[in-house]
Structure formats: C-alpha cells, structure tokens
Image (cartoon, grey):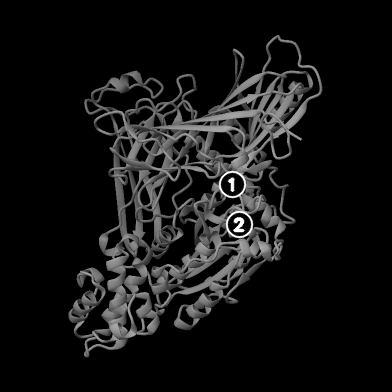
Amino acid sequence: MNHCGLLTAKKEPVPLKSIEVELEVRDHVATVVSTLLYENKEDKPLEAVFVFPLPGDAAVCHFSAKIGQTQIVAEVKEKQKAHEEYDDALSSGQQAFLLEESDQSPDIFSLSVGSLPPGESASIRLEYVTELAVQADDGLRFCLPAVLNPRYQPQGSEGGSVQVTSVPASLVPYSLSFSARVFSPRPISKVESKCSLDPLQYLNTEKTQATVKLAAGHKFDRDVELLIYYKDAHQPTAVVEAGQASAKPGTLMGDPVVMLSLYPEFPQAVMSSVASCGEFVFLIDRSGSMDCPMDNSNQQETRIGSARDTLLLLLKSLPMGCYFNIYSFGSSYQHIFPKSVEYSEKTMEEALKKVEKMDADLGGTEILEPLKHIYSQPCIPSQPRQLFVFTDGEVGNTKEVINLVRDNSGSHRCFSFGIGEGASSALINGLAKEGGGHAQFITGTDRMQPKVMQSLRFALQPAVVDISVTWDLPKAVSVTVLSPPITTIFQGQRSLIYVQLTGQVGAAPCHSEIPLWSDFSALKNSPETAEGCVTVKYSLTGHPSQNQLRFSLKPAEDTGLTVHRLGARTLIRSLEMDIENEVEQDEGVKQKVVELSVQSGVSSSFTAFIAVNKDDSEAIQGPLLRRNVPAPRMMFASYCMMSCASLDIFLQGSCPFDNSFEAAMPKQPRRDPLLQLVSLQKASGCWLLEPALAAALGKTSEEVENPQPSAVNKEVWATILALIWLHGFKSDVQDEWELLAMKAASWLCAQKAPCVTECVEAGNALLGCKVQKDSLGI
C-alpha cells in the first residue's frame, strides 16, 4: 500500500513540518529560539504530542503560538492547574498548547498542541537560555540535542518510563535549519562542529562578532554541537544585569543580578606535581546500547570498545601507592575485586585481563544498584575516593541517581562521561555537579581518551578545602547568593556564581548619592560607577590561597533578562533538590518554587507553560485525533532498526541475533600503535626490553638491542626508547599519555642511571627522532 504525505513508522501522518533554531551566544551564555511549524493535513482535528530533549540545565523562559494572525503567549502556572486548563480548553473546542518538563528528568520536555483544525497551521516559538560548558581544550560547548533515545526504566524504580515515539534518524520527516550569532568581549578564534557548517562570517574587524550556519542537508543522525573558541578564554568576568522595570524592587526580577565567571589559578609549584594517593573507582556501562558505534562514520569503533581502550590508559596512568577497583553494570552489576585493592603490577594485570573481556552484554541500564554498593564500601583512610562513571546515559530514573550521588558527596568526587548521541545531559552534568567533579561528553568522532585523561588530571590535583566567597560592596547594597556553595575547585575549571543585589549603590568618590537600583538611567550615564569586589579563599595543600575579581556595578548593555533567568533556574534547581532529598518537608518550599517560576517565567518541575486561544471563533467540532510526533533516534550499527535504548530493555544477557548477523559485523581493526605501546608498560612506569616492545616501535629485536649502551640496564634503555617514541611520534595526543610518561620519567630518575644523555642520543638515532633529553622529564 502506498502512503502519501509525512508518515511515522506506524504510517500515521506527522503534523510537525519543520524546526528552525536560532542561537545567540554572548560570552559563555546561550539563548536559543526554536520555531516549530505544525500543519494538520488530515480531515479531523488533531492533538500533536512531541517529546524532545533539551540541555539539562536550560532555563525555558518563553513559549508562544501563532495561528493565522493570532499570537498567543503562554503563561507559567502550577502544573496541575495548567493541565486542567488544557483539558478544559480541548473539551470546549478551544485550541490550547502545553509545554512541561518530564517528572523523571529535567532534560526531557513534552509539547502538546491541542485541537489543530483540518488544514490549519500553527507556529510554536520556544526560547531557553543555558550556560556553555568549558571543554578540555578551552572551547565552549553548545549542544542542540536532536536525538532522544528511549530511557531505560529499571524495575521497581519510581515513575513510568518516558514515552518516546521514535524512528531512525534517516526517516524523520521534518527538516531542521540552524543558525548562530556569537558576541564576545574577546576575539573569536574559531567555531567548529562535527556537523557541516557554512564558513564563519565575522561581523567586525575586531572579530568579536560572528555568524555561522548549519550547512544544507544536515541529517538527524546526531546532535548539533558547536565548539566556540575565544582568545583568553580563562579570563574571569562579571556581568551585572539590570532588573525588570515592571517588577517590584526587592524581588529577584526587580533587583539587579550579577553573574560571575571565576577561573582560580593554582601556584605552578602545586600543579607541577600530582597526588600519589587516592581510591579510584571506575564504573562502566555494559548495557546493550554500548555496542552502538561511536559515530556513523566509523562503524568499527563501538562505545564499549572505546571504553576498554580508555580503561587501559587510566590503569597505566594511576600512581603507585593508590587503590582502585572496576565495576560494570547493565541489568545487574559486577566488580573485578570484592573491594578496592592497592595498585601494583599484579593487581593491574589482573584487572586488564578482565577489562579485555568486557562486552556490552549485561542488558539494561540500571546504574542505581552498583552506585549503592560502591557507597556502602568504607572509605580507605588517607585515600580520597574518586569515582569515574562511563555511560550512554539512557536511564529513566535520573533524579534518583543524582540524589544518591548528592547524598554521598561528602565522601567522594564524581567524574562523569556521556558517551554517544542521546546521552542524558541532566544525568551526566548532574552526577558531576552533585559529586563535586567534572562532566565530559564524547560524541561523533571525539576520542574518549583525552577527555578522560583531563578528568584524571583533575582527580590527581590536590583537594581544595575551606572554600569561602566574600563580597565587598557599597554599604547600602546587600547580597543574596542564588547559587549553591562552591564545594570544589579545579585548576582550569570555571565556577559560575549568581547573586541578587538589593538596596542602593553606595556613595561615589565625590560622596554623591546614586539612585535606587530600579532607576538605572543615572547609573548608566554616570561617568563614575561604584565597584564591587569578590574574593574566593581556599586552602591548598595546607597553604591558604585566594583569587580576587573587581568589577563595575554598571549594568551591561543588551543582556535582556538572560542572567536573571539563569539565576532563577539555579535557585529553582537547588530548592527542587532540597525537596527531593527531603531536606525540606514544608509544603511552603514547593510553593516558593512555583512562585519563583511564575515570577521569572522560567520552567520548573512543579510548573508548566499553558496557552489557550480564547478568541471568539467557533468551537472546533469532531473527534480529536492524537498524533505522537516521532523524535529521531540512533540506529544500532547499520543493521538494526531498533533503538539503542530499546536494546537495553530487550537484551537481558543474551543476544537476539543469529550468527549471520555476527558474521556481517566488520572485523575488528588492528590495535592502535599508541595503545599497543602503552599496554606493555609496567605499573611502576618502566618498560621491559622484549620482542613486543620492538614490534610496537616498528623495529626488530636485534635493531632495538644492538644500540643499547653497555652501562645501562635493559629496563632503563627500553623505557627511554618508549618515551622518545611517544614524544617523537605521538606529540599530537600528548594529553592522552602525559601522565603515564610522567610516571616513567619518575621511575627513570629514581634509577639514577648513568649515560642517560648517551641513551637519548642513541634512541633518537635508532627511531629517527630529534627529541631533547629535557623534554622527557629526566
């Protein structure tokens, strides 16, 4: 049978025709405006429901609909009340629109378009603001989630699973257009993406403004990710935003809000050394979806395969004297050792043998139970616990998992890694935020290894304690901090703080009084502006340190209410977490969230956006048909039309495919030369002079053994050769092997071997390199 028009996999007409996205980036904050065009081509009125992802920390701040010439702006209301209004409108034949956050995860939203008459079109406008995370290479990451995989709901967990109608990305019948404008106080170096972009266009000679567009023909087989690079990206900044003129002074929206971006700098002497202690616990997702390819251009590298390679690098880079263990999970969980063991050659080799056999064969994605088991293990004295979580993030009990990490945040730091398209940003960011660690996303052609090794460097940094933030402001100005307290500081990591300022700006140097904050005209035009100062103090390796930032209290131009909305979102999230963790039982806290959400126009878990068309047109007649708009999802390799997360539910320890499917899979590629060399390193940091090392260096055993100076032993010679090869041939990925090379250099220095310079010269001659001895760290 031939079907005409836009159809889902169930052969139902799709009312969503197109999505247009406009992105505006100002410094490290993004405003995103999405316009969704719906059209009913059926002969009966429709209700269209579209479940889609948004960044987990996004503040949805505007929702409106346009039908013909009628524009309807939605209001934020308590969720139950909004549902009742929506149902009443539909039952009376009125058009209505409802936008709400999922009860299970703050990064999933549901949009209901009700009573769209036959032949009618509706244009939906959705706006949100979000912070941009800083990546390992100082790039700011913006991600437009395009892929929504169904979330696995563990048995016995709270709530039902998120209902997602999904089809393979190649069959999604609506189009996407995407454009971005970037404004920065510093020059924009470049904008990159794994998606094809039109060339970057600068709008001024200073290169502080630019535009970029997604190239035509983009497929919905991956999220749209932009990496934006500024010069001097780590410069601390402060943005003061004026309050809303119509809002009452003393309220969040009526007062100015300050957003501070801080990058504490540690002394170089501290950063040149790494910790030699710690308990490192690695938690690896082995659910069925981890067998998906890392990206569509390379079907051979799977998520679980990349995780195995990354574990190799991690285990080789750990310092002697630490403790470690490896857990893996699916529908059940396993651990390599009953409890964390001391790192040695024996325990490292035992762990690596088991890592090599790890496959995506444990079924669903139930991360809660292994986390509970890890937290039930007593901490080891003088060995700070560092938890590394690797998952594709397709779980339905996100809030439960994050709450558990938060409850145990005093005993560990949590570093999280979202693997592949469709990973839940709410889960990955939430784990790191509540666990005092750092979050990374690995998508497309990204290599997992450099991002994970950056997090290991963070974990090996000395723990910062006794953190305090103090404010020095004019006398008549009081501060209300909207952000939760800073609990962790890493070198190179940004900390964002939002504060509300209430009262009057104090006297200028000439002792003249500056008007109330609600009247900014005098302040904006004043030649002299009051200053504020914030000081972050902390203790590092027993020594007190501090970083200070002075900033003008003059409001920034053209910021709209972006900072206020992000500040409101931050405060709303903190209050919601208190309620979920039963820190506050009082019903008044929930009411405070609702009031703050309504006042700021920012969504929360207790509110929803509701818009009803109350014009005088006739009621819509006829039965109302429901149509679920399909969201794009990933395909399992290129062979299976089942979504990856559906595989998690389906695969409960056994593979449903026969041998013919297995035979069709590509052969595993030859091991990467870098990993081949790394796999031979001993736990102490040295290499042995053996045929496998010669092969990894691309030489015969005789070629490697003959130039060895007689005054040094074989291990010293082999280790120097390995370091020369790393520096000479793999300098472009130094961030992947830098820690294990430091361990090798420390081992060499401890040997006090003679003729090191002669060894380096002989090694360079053998390998055809020009590596200096000093660059090896010996």
Q: Name the residue at the front extreme.
A: 1
Q: Is residue 581 visible?
A: no
Mark 2: give few (<14), some (14-19) or many (20+) Cα within 10 Å.
some
User: In this orientation, which residue lies closer to the viewer: 723 or 274?
Assistant: 723
Q: Image check: 633 left or right of 118? A: left
Amino acid type of the residue tagged 2 in the rendering:
Leu
Residue at the image position 63 percent from the left and 67 percent from the top: 373
Mark 1: give few (<14), some (14-19) or many (20+) Cα within 10 Å.
some
User: Compared with residue 599, is residue 11 higher up or lower down, i.e. above or below?
Assistant: below
Q: Name the residue at the bottom extreme.
A: 710
User: Compared with residue 379, is residue 260 higher up or lower down, i.e. above or below?
Assistant: above
Image coordinates for residue 515, horizontal then vertical, percent? 35, 21
Quadrant in the picture for the C terminus = bottom left
Image coordinates for residue 591, horizontal then vertical, percent? 63, 34
User: Compared with residue 247, is residue 32 higher up or lower down, i.e. above or below?
Assistant: below
Quadrant in the picture for the N terminus = top right
- Element on which disc 1 rests: helix
Residue at the image position 34 percent from the left and 65 percent from the top: 541
Image coordinates for residue 695, horizontal then vertical, percent? 37, 78
User: Residue 370, located in which quarter of the rendered image?
Assistant: bottom right
Q: Which mark is residue 404?
A: 2
User: Compared with residue 255, is residue 233 higher up or lower down, i.e. above or below?
Assistant: below
Amino acid type of the residue tagged 1 in the rendering:
Met
Q: Image check: 266 left or right of 291? A: left
**Tag 1 residue:** 577
Q: Image check: 663 left or right of 511? A: right
